[in-house]
Image (cartoon, rainbow, N blue to C red):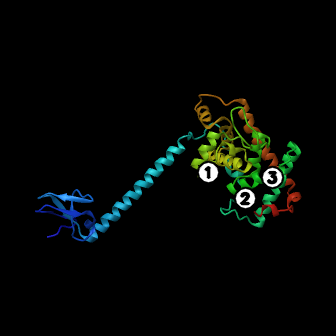
Amino acid sequence: MRANWASPYLRPAAGRIPSGRIIQHGTRWPLFSDICHKIRPGAVALTIPQGRLQFFSLFLLSASGALMVFLAALVNQSHNAELPSIIARSVPSISWDSWVPAFQRDQEYNFTLQQRREMASQLHFVREIIQNQFKRSDAEETAQIIVQESMRAGVDPLFVAAVVKAESSFKRNARSPVGAQGLMQVMPATGKFITKIRGLEWQGSGKLYEAKYNVRVGIAYLDYLKKLFDHDMQKVLVAYNWGPANLEKSLRGEKRPPSSTLKYAKTILGDHQKWRSDLHKNRAKYKYMGTSFLLS
């Protein structure tokens, strides 16, 4: 009588059975099969019903799929572990939500007319800041890059503009003594790390002098720090300037942030709040300015 799962039997004679036959109903399956396995007299084999074998195959596929998901999670965790994960406690929290525009990014970048008008208002506002305060000849193009990349990432362009002002004074070719590059002063090692974990293409350190690429990578790093530090923007800015590992040590009481770093964060938050207020007061001035340059 056949067992419920599989019935063992003895194969009395030696022979060779192609392993491909083991998938057929009632085929004798040697315990140790190979491309063509030699069966010795008296070797024990199994007979597995067709339906049971299909169920067993599905089980193996499901188990292997679960294992792949588990291994992928471990790999992802190892990437995230390259920078510290902490929970901030000692500084009052400033929510990231206040820096997010009223509408979020459109994944296909197909902005509505209302969105383009909002973008145009902020673009003209940022352009005037760059022109009036820093006399940059490329003010309009730089402002357009900052606004569009910010909107596509779901971040307030005025906040990103305040970071760019503090980091490089809107100079595309800026380079710090320690090697930070471009508008948002991205370190090559940081750029390589953040593009890897965010699925962006790392195009080499020289590409960081290209304004659009630099801003895109810089925003991705800000977003990474935002999630790392519980949406506390003061900590995000300290980590962006001083490094997340140093901030972790500071939160453990092992070291104090430099006064220059604290001033850096305070200046950016102050500029952002002032610019938001100024734009709101003068919104009518920018409301009907052209939007044709935002159609692409």
Residue type at numbered disc 3? Glu
Q: Residues within 10 Å of mark 1 (few under 14, many from 20)?
A: few
Q: Residue at x 71, y 34 (%)?
A: 261
Give the position of the N terminus as an image quadrant: bottom left
Where residue 123 appears, as percent x and y from the top left, is 81, 54
In this picture, residue 296 sits left or right of residue 58 = right
User: Closer to the camera, 1 or 141?
Assistant: 141
Where residue 63 appears, as percent x and y from the top left, is 37, 58
The reply to whether the C-beta atoms of the residues labelled 2 and 3 are less than 8 Å apart is no
Task: Point out the residue furthest to the top here.
Answer: 255
Q: Which numbered disc flags the more N-terminal residue, 1 or 3? A: 3
- In the image, residue 49 above or below residue 236: below
Q: Gap in Å between the C-alphas at discs 1 and 3?
A: 23 Å
Residue type at numbered disc 1? Glu
Q: Which residue is mark 3?
A: 141
Where residue 96 appears, as percent x and y from the top left, is 67, 49
Figure quadrant of residue 147: bottom right
Q: Which residue is mark 1?
A: 201
Residue type at numbered disc 2? Ala
Q: Residue at x 72, y 58 (%)?
A: 102
